[in-house]
Image: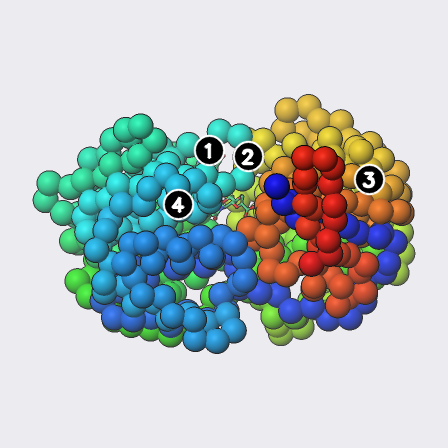
Amino acid sequence: MNTQKKFVIKGGRVLNGEVEISGAKNAVVAILPAAILADEPCIIENVPDISDVDISIRILRELGAKVTYLGPHTYEIDARGVNSSCVPYESARKMRASYYFMGALLGRFKHCRVSMPGGCPLGDRPIDQHLKAFKKLGADTKVDRGMVDITTANGLHGAQIFFDCVTVGATMNAILAAVKADGLTIIENAAKEPHIVDLASFLNSMGAEIMGAGTDTIKIRGVKYLRGTSYAVIPDQIEAGTYMVAAAATGGNVLIKNVIPKHLESIISVMEKIGVKIEQFDDSVRVSVDGPLVKTSVKTRPHPGFPTDMQPQISALLCLAEGTSMIKEGVSEQRFQYVDELRRMGADIQVDGKVAVIEGTGKLTGAPVKACDLRAGAALMIAGLAASGVTTIEDIFHIERGYSDMAGKLRALGACIEKVTVVQKETGTQQDAV
Ligand code: EPU
């Protein structure tokens, strides 16, 4: 007997009220492995309830770390007992960010064996730049039957690392590996995302010497010892953007709390062009709509540009706007797989390579659809909320990788959404609400 979870949304409800944003997925999935580098226990706060965190914690425990739940969103990680530097396929395949165990284990043990990562199917996602950084720091790397073997003859030493493309993952991995290497490391053409600054701030709070995170040149002076710390993860910029778009798509009025407005600048700018009203406060933004939504052109770029992780959600919004909009994908290889699903809901979108042209129809209709990756799932949630009729979304495990209790948060804003478990029997199917 197979079970599958789905979201069932009765669309057309206007979202109103307040929503609290959780800690950032793409920061916490690097900060949790980074705790392996600490020589004393660390307390990490504002940890989101998402399955990528569950997987990271499971891997930490498998490696020998003691992970203690201290209360809502707070864990203590004591990595002094970590006695393995191997992350097998079964653990790593479930999420892309398992690659951060390479940098963290290499930084601590000067060798590691970690499976090639899994994660969202967004096209070819090589890790050549990660391996280039490890090699520059003095490691040998070998990929053998899906496992990456990283060894060093004489430990790790500071180096000049120039990335051939701007990459979040390789920048974070280079920081993790270099933080306890001998001497000075200089990373050039580094990614500048808020989660990179957050990882550096976490490590610096333990005594690391990382300078320039958030710019394209990061300098790291290696240290021998990292003390314990208590650190709160930054709010999730993409979760915030997703609720901002959901509010706008339903013509609602929502206060999005626990955000850093500076991290939302490019999202705010695009949404304002579409005609959405956004008021900014110290740690919240209010989204409302008091006129028609209009077409625009968007190109995704590395930070501080418009994030690729918001591209599917903004496309869903543009389906509801008047006129012809254009989306250019400037970061990911394949990020338009969700388009077929939106078409099932009445969207008029043509894709040619990395460009999508959206004819705003002003409306969407509910349909059965499938989340093909995390942000595609978020876009379908938004489309379902705005559509007339019922939308059922399958494969919601993608959504649960990165969104903390999305159905609960949306229900609190007035959405009509249920998570149902479908029990598939040999003779048919049966649904139970959970
Ligand atoms: N790239 C290479 N070689 C590498 C690494 C990257 O060619 O060694 C290329 C990629 O193929 C891609 C571009 O560089 O075309 C950017 O990739 P990046 O390394 O920045 O992405 P990532 O680290 O694999 C992270 C996020 C993604 C997000 C991207 C871009 C995590 C765990 N993942 O992925 O998040 O889309 O940065 O901002 O931080 C998501 O949250 O939904 C998600 C997919």
Separation of marks 3 and 4 at Cα, in angstroms: 34 Å
Q: Is mark 2 within 8 Å of ligand 1?
A: yes
Q: Is residue 33 above or below residue 205?
A: above
According to the picture, the residue beneath numbered tag 3 turns out to be 367
Residue 298 in sight from this viewpoint: no
Which residue is nearer to you in this view: 127 or 79? 79
Separation of marks 1 and 3 at Cα, in angstroms: 31 Å
- Coordinates of residue 374 in the picture (x, y in percent): 60, 45
What residue appears at the point 11 percent right and 40 percent down from the top-left corner? Answer: 153
Which residue is nearer to you in this view: 288 or 391? 391
Identity of the residue furthest to the left in this view? 154
Task: Look at the numbered discs 2 and 3 and tell me whether their residues touch, using CB distance below 8 Å.
Answer: no
Q: Quadrant of residue 93?
A: top left
According to the picture, the residue beneath numbered tag 4 turns out to be 91
Q: Which is more N-terminal, label 1 or label 4?
A: 4
Element carrying mark 2: loop
Separation of marks 4 and 1 at Cα, in angstroms: 19 Å
Task: Look at the numbered discs 2 and 1 and tell me whether their residues touch, using CB distance below 8 Å.
Answer: yes
Residue 69 in sight from this viewpoint: yes
Q: Report the amino acid beneath label 3.
A: Ala
Separation of marks 2 and 3 at Cα, in angstroms: 24 Å
Left or right: 27, with 104 as reference point: right
Name the mark on residue 122: 2
Q: Is residue 171 above or below residue 43?
A: above
